C-alpha cells in the first residue's frame, strides 16, 4: 500500500510541475515580451467596422469596411462622390512619447492610382506637427505595403492628443476609390535630441513644421517643410507661383538687447540663383530698424552657408518685438524655389558705449509766462463710441473684404465668411488713440445681437475681435464668447470691462486699429468653420454647416468710458 501511495505522489508531482512548465512556456512564447512594441492604433484592419476611425470631407463621399482586405475579410473603403479641398480619414487621441522614433506601416491602394499624404499632428489647436507632415505616398492600383519612419517632435513630455491622418486632397477626384488595411504604428526606439546651437529663434531647422515661421506674399506661393535640409530631414521650402512686390519669410517677437553684436547664420539657396535681402526690424508700428536693413545675400543654386554680423540699434532697453525677415522681392520670379535651413541668431557680445559728453552749459533764460491751458472737459454721462453696427447674414460663402488701409504685411483685403466675418469699423470710429482724450479702452464693452433667422436650435456663442497692424492671432483682442449665447431668434445683450478682453494687453490702445471680426462658435467655444483646416471636425454637429448657416443678425458693439453710463443703442 505504501508503494502505491508513493507512486500516486510522484505522478501528482509530475503533473503539477509539467503544468507549471507549460504555463511558463505559454507565457513566454504567446504573451508579448516587455520589449515588444505595441500598435497604438485601434482597429488597424477595420475588422470592427470603422470604429475609432473618422472620415471627413468638405466635398462628398462615404467610408465603409465593405470590401476584403489584403488578406483579411475587411478593409477601409472610401468613395469620393465629389472631390473636396479637405478630405481625410484619421484616428485621434493617440499616445506618443517625445524624441522617439516611430514606424508607420500600412497597406493601401486607389483604383485610379491617385496619391495621398500622411501626417502625425496635434489633434486640436494649434495643430502642432508631431513628426510627420504631409508625407506624400505614391499609391498603386492594387494592394501595396508602405512604411514611414519618423522621430517625434514639437512636444517635450508624453502626449495623448496625437492625430494620425491620411489626406486624399488635393489628389482626389470624382469616382475615386481608396482602400486601407493593416495600419500599424509602433515605437521603434528613443533618440537623443539633437544639440542645437543657442539661438533666439524657434524651430531653426524647420524640423517641427513651419511654426512659428510666417510666409507672406502679395503675389501667390506656398511655404512648406517638405524637402530635405542640409544634412537633416526637413528644410523650409518656398515656391513662387506668382511674383509679388512684398514677399517675405519671417519670425516675430524676438528678444534683443540694446548696443549688442549679434550673428545671423543660415543655409539657403534658390533654384534659379535669385537673391534675397535680410532685415531685423521692429515688428509693429513704427517698424524701426533694429540694426540690419535689406542686407542683400547672393544665393547660389545649391546649399551654401551665410553669416551676417550686426549691432543692434534703434532702442535703448531690451525689446521683445523684433522681426527677422527674409525678403525675396524684388528678386522673385514665377517658378522660383527658395530653400532655408539652420537659421541661427545668437548674441556675440555687448558694445561698450563711449562716455557721454558733458554739454556746455547755456545761459539761464527767464521764461515768458504762458496762459494756463484750458483743461479737456470731462465726457458727459452717456458718452459712447459705436465700434460696429451691422446687419449681416452668416453663410457658408467666403468673400474678401477690402481694408481701409494696408496692413503691415502689405495686405489690402482679408478673407471673410463662415466662422470669421470681417468688417470695417463704424463711421466716426477714431483713427487714433482709444485712451485719450476719452478713455474708451479703460471702460466697458457692450454688445447687442438681434437674431432674425437661425436654422436650428444648436447653441451659438458670438464674439467680436479687434485687430491692430496685422490680421494674426497675436495682433487681436477678443470679447468673451461665453457672455453672448443664444439658441433661437430674439435679442440678446452682453457687457464686460474692456480690460477683461482676451489678449487685451496685446493691443496698443493709443494707436489706430485695423479691422473688426465677428466669430460664430458652438456651445463649446469651437469656431463653426471649414475654411481653416484646424477647425474642421471640431465643432458640434460637424460637418453639417446647415445647422448654423444661414443666420441673419444685426450686431452692435459699443464702448463706453468709465462713468459713461449705459449705452444708447442705435
Image (tube, grey):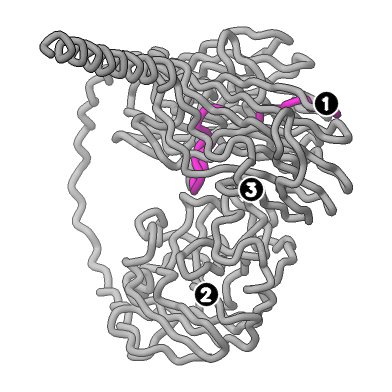
Q: Position of residue 321 (x, y in %)?
A: 41, 39
Pointer 1 or 3: first along the chain? 3
Residue lying furthest left:
2
Q: CA distance from mark 1 to mark 2?
A: 45 Å
Whichever of labels 1 and 2 marks the residue nearer the N terminus, that label is: 1
Residue 530 drawn at (x, y percent): 65, 57
Q: Is residue 303 visible to us here?
A: yes
Task: Identify the image quadrant of residue 168.
Answer: top right
Point 48% across, 52% down: residue: 475
Residue 217 in magenta stretch: no
Residue 191 or 147: which is nearer the viewer? 147
Residue in front for this viewpoint, 431 or 33? 33
- Where 101 sits versus 417, above or below? above
Q: Residues within 10 Å of mark 2 (few under 14, many from 20)?
A: many
Q: Which residue is mark 3?
A: 49
Give me the disc on residue 140: 1
Residue at image x 64%, y 30%? 182
Residue 174: image tag: none
| Highlighted range, magenta | 121-141
Q: Which residue is mark 2?
A: 460
In the rendered view, does 275 fall on the left or right side of 292?
A: right
Q: Tell me: residue 327, above or below residue 466.
A: above
User: In the image, 509: left or right of 535?
Assistant: left
- Separation of disc 1 and disc 3 at Cα? 24 Å
Amino acid at each position: 500500500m505504501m508503494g502505491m501511495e508513493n507512486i500516486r505522489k510522484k505522478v501528482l508531482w509530475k503533473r503539477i510541475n509539467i503544468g507549471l512548465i507549460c504555463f511558463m512556456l505559454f507565457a513566454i512564447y504567446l504573451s508579448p515580451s516587455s520589449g515588444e512594441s505595441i500598435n497604438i492604433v485601434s482597429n488597424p484592419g477595420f475588422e470592427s467596422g470603422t470604429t475609432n476611425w473618422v472620415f471627413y470631407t468638405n466635398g462628398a463621399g462615404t467610408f465603409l469596411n465593405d470590401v476584403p482586405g489584403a488578406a483579411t475579410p475587411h478593409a477601409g473603403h472610401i468613395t469620393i462622390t465629389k472631390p473636396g479641398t479637405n478630405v481625410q480619414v484619421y484616428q485621434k487621441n493617440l499616445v506618443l512619447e517625445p524624441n522617439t522614433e516611430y514606424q508607420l506601416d500600412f497597406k493601401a491602394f486607389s483604383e485610379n492610382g491617385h496619391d495621398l499624404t500622411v501626417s502625425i499632428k496635434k489633434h486640436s489647436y494649434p495643430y502642432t506637427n508631431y513628426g510627420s507632415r504631409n508625407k506624400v505616398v505614391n499609391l498603386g492600383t492594387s494592394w501595396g505595403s508602405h512604411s514611414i519612419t519618423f522621430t517625434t517632435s514639437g512636444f517635450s513630455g508624453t502626449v495623448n492628443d496625437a492625430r494620425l491622418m491620411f489626406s486624399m486632397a488635393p489628389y482626389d477626384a470624382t469616382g475615386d476609390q481608396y482602400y486601407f488595411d493593416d495600419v500599424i504604428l509602433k515605437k521603434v526606439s528613443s533618440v537623443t535630441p539633437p544639440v542645437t546651437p543657442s539661438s533666439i529663434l524657434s524651430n531653426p531647422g524647420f524640423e517641427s513644421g513651419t511654426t512659428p515661421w510666417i510666409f507672406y506674399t502679395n503675389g501667390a506661393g506656398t511655404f512648406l517643410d517638405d524637402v530635405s535640409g542640409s544634412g537633416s530631414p526637413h528644410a523650409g521650402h518656398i515656391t513662387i507661383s506668382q511674383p509679388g512686390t512684398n514677399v517675405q519669410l519671417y519670425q516675430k517677437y524676438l528678444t534683443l538687447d540694446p548696443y549688442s553684436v549679434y550673428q545671423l547664420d543660415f543655409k539657403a539657396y534658390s533654384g534659379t540663383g535669385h537673391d534675397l535681402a535680410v532685415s531685423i526690424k521692429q515688428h509693429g508700428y513704427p517698424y524701426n530698424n533694429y540694426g540690419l536693413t535689406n542686407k542683400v545675400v547672393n544665393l547660389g543654386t545649391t546649399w551654401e552657408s551665410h553669416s551676417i554680423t550686426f549691432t543692434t540699434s534703434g532702442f535703448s532697453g531690451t525689446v521683445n518685438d523684433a522681426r527677422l525677415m527674409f525678403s525675396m522681392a524684388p528678386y522673385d520670379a514665377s517658378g522660383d524655389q527658395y530653400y532655408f535651413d539652420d537659421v541661427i541668431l545668437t548674441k556675440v557680445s555687448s558694445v561698450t558705449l563711449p562716455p557721454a559728453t558733458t554739454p556746455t552749459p547755456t545761459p539761464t533764460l527767464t521764461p515768458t509766462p504762458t496762459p494756463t491751458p484750458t483743461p479737456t472737459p470731462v465726457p458727459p454721462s452717456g458718452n459712447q463710441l459705436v465700434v460696429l453696427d451691422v446687419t449681416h447674414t452668416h453663410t457658408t460663402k467666403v468673400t474678401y473684404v477690402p481694408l481701409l488701409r494696408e496692413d503691415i504685411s502689405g495686405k489690402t483685403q482679408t478673407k471673410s465668411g463662415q466662422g470669421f466675418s470681417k468688417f470695417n469699423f463704424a463711421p466716426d470710429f477714431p483713427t487714433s488713440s482709444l485712451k485719450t482724450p476719452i478713455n474708451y479702452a479703460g471702460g466697458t464693452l457692450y454688445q447687442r445681437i438681434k437674431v432674425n433667422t437661425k436654422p436650428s436650435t444648436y447653441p451659438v456663442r458670438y464674439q467680436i475681435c479687434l485687430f491692430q497692424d496685422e490680421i494674426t492671432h497675436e495682433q487681436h483682442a477678443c470679447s468673451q464668447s461665453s457672455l453672448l449665447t443664444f439658441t433661437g431668434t430674439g435679442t440678446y445683450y452682453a457687457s464686460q470691462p474692456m480690460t477683461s478682453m482676451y489678449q487685451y494687453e496685446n493691443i496698443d490702445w493709443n494707436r489706430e486699429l485695423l479691422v473688426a471680426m465677428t466669430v460664430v462658435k458652438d456651445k463649446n467655444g469651437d469656431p463653426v468653420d471649414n475654411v481653416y483646416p484646424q477647425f474642421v471636425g471640431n465643432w458640434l454637429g460637424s460637418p453639417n454647416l446647415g445647422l448654423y448657416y444661414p443666420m441673419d443678425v444685426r450686431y452692435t458693439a459699443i464702448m463706453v468710458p468709465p462713468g459713461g453710463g449705459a449705452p444708447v443703442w442705435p
